[in-house]
Amino acid sequence: MTKFLSAAAFFLTLAATAFYQGWPPFTASEKVEDYPLAKSRRADIAPDLNIAGEVKPSLQVDVKPEVGGRIRQIHVIPGQKVNKGDLLVTIDDTDLLNERAAADAEIEGARLIMGKSKGNFDRARQLHERKLLSDEEFLNIMADFKIEENGLDKALRRRQTVDDRLAKTRVLAPFDGTVLEIPVSEGQVVVGAASVNSGTSLMTYADLSRLLIISQVNQLDAAKLSLGQDLTIQSPDSDKATATAKVLFIAPLASVKNNIKGFEVRGVIDRNDGALKPGVSVTVRLALPKITGVVTVPLTAIFEGKGKKAVYLLKDGKPQKCEVIVGAIDSTHAEIKSGIGENEDVLLVEPSETSAKSKS
């Protein structure tokens, strides 16, 4: 009898200790108001499609020289805004100036020779008209004059070529824009861009007044997009909309990026106020058509585990786990397609957390 009473006392003590320490996690003695609750209810859902995007200028070029040579001076710095036609870089023109001087001397000599040849031709024409010079002699003198005249034309064209190259030693801004990067330095020898080579990049230059948002959208969500659709752009360091854009382009052919098959989508920001910079990552939010009259719960009431979603209902003062199928989602609520009905009490924290809080 004594052993029986001792065993009974032991199990009573164990049960009391377990109950005090919170096991089982929920009991009928715990009050409903101990749990943070919400009601499942019928409501409208205005779902958003959130995708990652990257900001790029709509117009960006690598500025390259058309002539090679040593950089004499760089007239801009990264981040500087310039207007079309402003001077960006000057390339040393010493060799070209020497070529031009030589071309001028060649032109002067060609003019002297042609002047003498023209005098001979004018006299020969007069003699030929008076029948004092044979046709053969006249034609020979005229041919000499034409050759000298052609020589002057060639010399003038050579000087024009040198002048064109001299003009290209002044590298000008191709359009209104901003200097993004300058990978060269003064004194560096650069190669001119030509059909046989790509040339040396002097700087990266872009128009930042109009930006593109480049995103990769999976093949299921891409079907929900259309050209001209409004997009809300949000930068990672802000919880508010940074800019608005419109869908400009949807790729006609799927591609694989980060092991996900989808379609490239481009949105355009026509007027950038400077809040976004090229190269940053952003969240692109697309408002989808509203879904009306569906069962909804707060997002905080949905929990995931082992690839399945669940909601905890409060039944008779105890939590009851119910697996659910979630449909459309907006910023605060989610549609519940199956698993629970409307007007149910749902927990906003997982049971273990609720238990710990209520015991504390």
Image: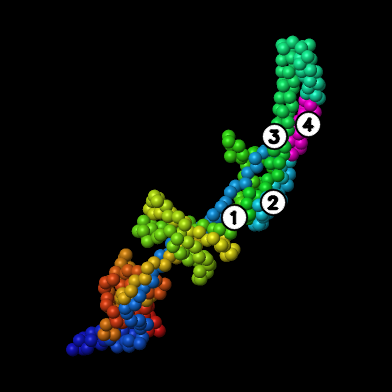
Q: Report the residue that reaches farthest toward the left.
A: 1
Does the residue at mark 1 contact the one at mark 4 (Cβ under 8 Å)? no
Q: Earlier in the sequence, mark 1 or mark 4?
A: 4
Which image quadrant is residue 92 in? top right
Q: Which mark is residue 104?
A: 4
**Drawn side of residue 132 relative to residue 231, left or right:** right
Q: Earlier in the sequence, mark 3 or mark 2?
A: 2
Q: Is residue 70 visible?
A: no
Please give the residue where the numbered disc 1 appears in the rendered image: 207
Q: From the image, state whether disc 4 or disc 2 is nearer to you.
A: 4
Quadrant where the C terminus sits is bottom left
Q: Residue at x 18, y 89 (%)?
A: 1
Please give the residue where the numbered disc 3 appears in the rendered image: 161
Give how far apart the Cα atoms at labels 4 and 2 are. 30 Å
Q: Earlier in the sequence, mark 1 or mark 3?
A: 3
Does the residue at mark 4 contact the one at mark 2 (Cβ under 8 Å)? no
Does the residue at mark 4 contact the one at mark 3 (Cβ under 8 Å)? no
Q: Is residue 224 above or below residue 25?
A: above
Tell me the amino acid under the disc marked 4: Asp
Dot 3 surroundings within 10 Å: few (below 14), some, or many (20 or more)? some
Look at the numbered disc 4 and give the secondary structure of its residue.
helix
